Amino acid sequence: MDKNKQDFDNKQRQEWIALLAKADPFLLKKAEKQLGKGIEYAYITKPETGMIMVRARADNKKSGFCLGEISVTKCILKIEKKIMGYAMVMGSDHDHAKNAALFDGLLQIPEYSSKLMQTLIPELKKISRNEKKKQAKQNQDTKVEFFTMKRGE
């Protein structure tokens, strides 16, 4: 098997990039320590914080509007002189952006990918599912239903 063969598709990569961006920074730091030493990486873009405009849509209309700006931190790494790892996280946590980019790159390398896909990614998916359930419950608890009555009823 070709060692540089891509064992993932773009949809999988989009999924893990989103999971890494939303992950608890302490969880990524812990996972990085478990990797041990020996992973060589160089910064292409050191973690840098900036602002991006958030767009939104109301009532499922096709045209959106500018909701406001949020701060984000992005980082790009070159891992083992061949693979690019990319991350953009909300907020200004430089370590979170660096670790997310590191794991994005490692997930593209078959020797690391298989272990991370069995350990880190399922844990992040579980946490994400629990957060979505918690948010849905909070939304349901605050849902207000409006109805109208005809005059005279």
Image (spheres, rainbow, N blue to C red):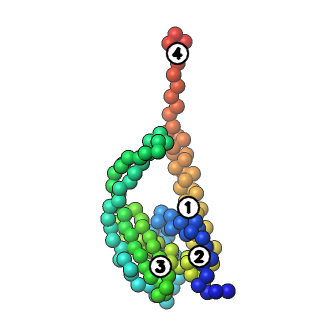
Q: Is residue 32 visible?
A: no
Tell which residue pokes out farthest to the top in this image. Answer: 152
**Mark 1 or mark 3, whichever is nearer to me:** 3
Image point (67%, 86%), residue name: 1
Secondary element at tag 2: helix
Q: Position of residue 71 (x, y in %)?
A: 34, 61
Q: Earlier in the sequence, mark 2 or mark 3?
A: 3
Amino acid residing under circle 3 = Met
Q: CA distance from mark 4 to mark 1?
A: 47 Å
Which numbered tag is attached to residue 116?
Answer: 2
Residue under label 4, please give it.
Answer: 150
Which numbered tag is attached to residue 84?
Answer: 3
Amino acid residing under circle 4 = Lys
Q: Position of residue 121 (x, y in %)?
A: 58, 69
Secondary element at tag 3: strand
Amino acid residing under circle 1 = Ile
Q: Earlier in the sequence, mark 1 or mark 3?
A: 3
Q: Quadrant of the C terminus?
A: top right
**Mark 1 or mark 2, whichever is nearer to me:** 2
